[in-house]
Amino acid sequence: MAIVTGAGEVSPAEPPRRNEGRGMMENVHILIVDDDSIIRETLSMNFEDQGVSVHGLSSGEALLEHLKGGETGDLILLDWKMGQFSGLDTLREMRRAGHEIPVIFLTSLTDQIYEEAALATGALDFIDKSRSFSILLHRVRTVLAGRRNPIGADMSAVVDDDAGTAKVRIGHLLLDPEVGRAYWQDQLVPLTLTEFQIVHALATEAGRDTRYRDIYDLVHGDGFHAGAAGDGYRANVRGFIKRIRRKFEEIDETFSEIENYPGFGYRWRAQDTGGGVS
C-alpha cells in the first residue's frame, strides 16, 4: 500500500497489523500536519488501528498555535508543501520557540536538497509519501525507541532483552537490526533509518569496498536515477556519509571507521579482532 500516489490520491488502506508492536504504540500521541484532509484522515485511521492517539492539523501555523497553547505530542509527522508557510519554516519556528518534539517529514518531495535541509534543521527522518504505511510505522517506532533509549542510556536495557534478535557487534559498534539502532562505545548514535541501513551495509562487510551506486540503491531503490549526467547519486551518497560521520564524531571525536575509496565508494575499516553476534 502506498500512502499517496503520485497524483496525490490515497491508495487503498493496508490491512492493519493490530498485534505487531501494538504495546509500544499505546499511549503514544502523534500530531499529523498536512494540508490535505484525506491524507490526515487516512493516516489517522491507520495509526489509531495501532493504538495511537492522533491529532490532525492543516498547516504549520495551526501546529505552532497548538503548541503555543500548551499542547504537545510524542512525535510530529510534517508535510513540506503547505501554502506560504512550509514544513521547514514550521520546524525552524518550533525549535526557536523551544519545542523539541521529534519530527519526521512525510512529503512527496524526494530531491536530495530537501532531505538534507530537513535533517540539518533537526528532523529525525525524511520519508517519501509513496512508501507503504508499514514502512512509515516501522520508522515511527524506531524514532520512539530512540527517545525511550536516549544517548548514554544503560545498554543492558537494550542488549539483554528476550526478543532473540541477532545483534551484530563489530569492534566498538553494536547494530540492532530489529529496531534500526546503532551504538558506538555503548552510546546510541541518533541515526535515521536510512543512515542505519547504510552503516549496517558497510559494517557487516567490513574491509570490503562498497560502490557509490550500491549505497545509493539502499536509499532510493535499485535503478533510481538522480542528478545531472547520471552522477548525482555520488553527491547524494557523500552527503549521507558526511552526516553519518558527524553523528559518530559527536560521541567519539577520533571516529575514523568509514573510509573512502576515491572514485569507487566507501568501506568500513577492517577490524583487527572481534565481531560477531550477540
Image: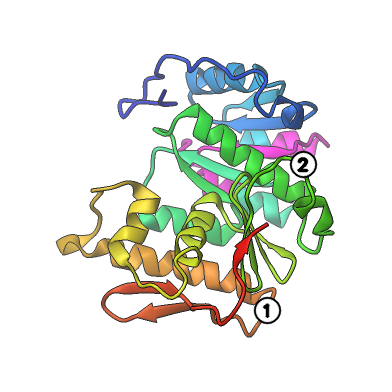
Vertical placement of residue 227 versus 261, above or below: above
Where residue 29 appears, x then y in whole percent? 74, 30
Q: Which residue is tagged 2?
A: 162
Vertical placement of residue 221 versus 151, above or below: above
Q: Residue furthest left?
A: 229
Question: Circle 1: is it few (<14), some (14-19), or many (20+) Cα within 10 Å?
Answer: some
SS at mark 2 in the image: loop
* Image quadrant containing the N terminus: top left
Where residue 268 appears, x then y in whole percent? 47, 73
Tell me where the magenta segment starts and ends, as one range.
65-90
> Amino acid under label 2?
Asp
Vertical placement of residue 17 versus 89, above or below: above
Vertical placement of residue 227 versus 90, above or below: below
Q: Residue furthest bottom?
A: 254
Along the viewing direction, whichever of 267 and 245 lies nearer the viewer: 267
Is residue 60 something one can see in this rendering? Answer: no
SS at mark 1 in the image: loop
Q: Which residue is tagged 1?
A: 252
> Amino acid under label 1?
Asp
Along the viewing direction, whichever of 93 and 34 lies nearer the viewer: 34
* Image quadrant containing the C terminus: bottom right
Where residue 59 appears, x then y in whole percent? 57, 33
Q: Is residue 82 magenta?
A: yes
Tell me which residue sits at (26%, 78%) in the image.
263
